Image (spheres, rainbow, N blue to C red):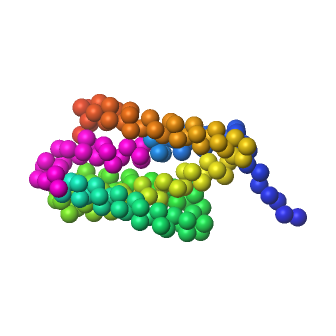
């Protein structure tokens, strides 16, 4: 006898939607707000505008390179493990970025490590939502995308308020 799992189509699935929203709410605005977060660090290590944009382009490049591997990773390990790995990469990359003292270190920690983490997270959240919904899938994905879109609007204000009280170096 084979057991087939039927998605709950609501209930706990909505918790997954809001977890996905929280994840994407923090990850999506990361690229545009890195200057707000690390402005003092960039001045401290004498980064030029060209170097800053190059590090951001390395970050974006590794997001898209990771997308090439996402299908393989999600099939082999599942969305939970891939998301956990992605969040771990982002945490480690941002933490190490606050401690570095040169341009190459910033490019490796933010550009490479954080870029891989954001890339791993991108597809796994959508797959998680799709696995918990069948009939309400359009509503769940629509709500997720709508609330995620608030991230780039609200995060600059949140980051500016937090930077006044807390410094990225700790």
> At 31% from the left edge and 45% from the top edge, which residue is drawn?
32
Residue 114 lies in quadrant: bottom left
Provide the major secondary structure of the magenta segment: helix
Can residue 88 be seen from the camera position used here? no
Relative to 30, residue 103 above or below: below
Give the quarter of the figure containing the N terminus: bottom right
The residues colored magenta run: 26-50
Of the pair 138 and 62, the residue shown nearer to us: 138
Q: Position of residue 134 (x, y in %)?
A: 72, 47
| Numbered disc total | 0
Residue 36 shows in the view: yes
Does 126 sit above or below residue 3?
above
156 left or right of 105 in image: right
Residue in view at x 23 percent, y 59 percent: 54
Does 75 appear above or below 125?
A: below
x and y, in percent, of residue 22 in the image: 49, 41
Q: Is residue 28 magenta?
A: yes
* Quarter of the figure with the C terminus: top left
**In x, y percent, where is residue 66?**
44, 64
Asked where in the image residue 52 lies, by quadrant, the reply is: bottom left
Q: Residue at x 18, y 57 (%)?
A: 51
């Amino acid at each position: 006898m084979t057991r087939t799992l039927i998605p709950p189509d609501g209930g706990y699935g909505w918790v997954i939607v809001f977890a996905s929203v929280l994840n994407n709410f923090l990850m999506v605005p990361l690229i545009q707000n890195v200057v707000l977060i690390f402005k003092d660090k960039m001045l401290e290590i004498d980064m030029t505008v060209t170097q800053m944009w190059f590090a951001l382009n390395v970050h974006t490049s590794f997001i898209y390179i990771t997308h090439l591997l996402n299908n393989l990773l999600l099939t082999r390990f599942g969305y939970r493990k891939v998301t956990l790995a992605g969040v771990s990469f982002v945490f480690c990359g941002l933490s190490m970025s606050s401690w570095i003292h040169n341009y190459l270190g910033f490019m490796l920690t933010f550009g490479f490590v954080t870029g891989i983490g954001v890339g791993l997270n991108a597809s796994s959240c959508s797959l998680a939502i799709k696995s918990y919904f069948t009939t309400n899938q359009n509503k769940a994905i629509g709500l997720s995308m709508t609330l995620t879109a608030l991230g780039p609007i609200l995060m600059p204000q949140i980051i500016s308020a937090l930077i006044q009280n807390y410094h990225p170096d700790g």
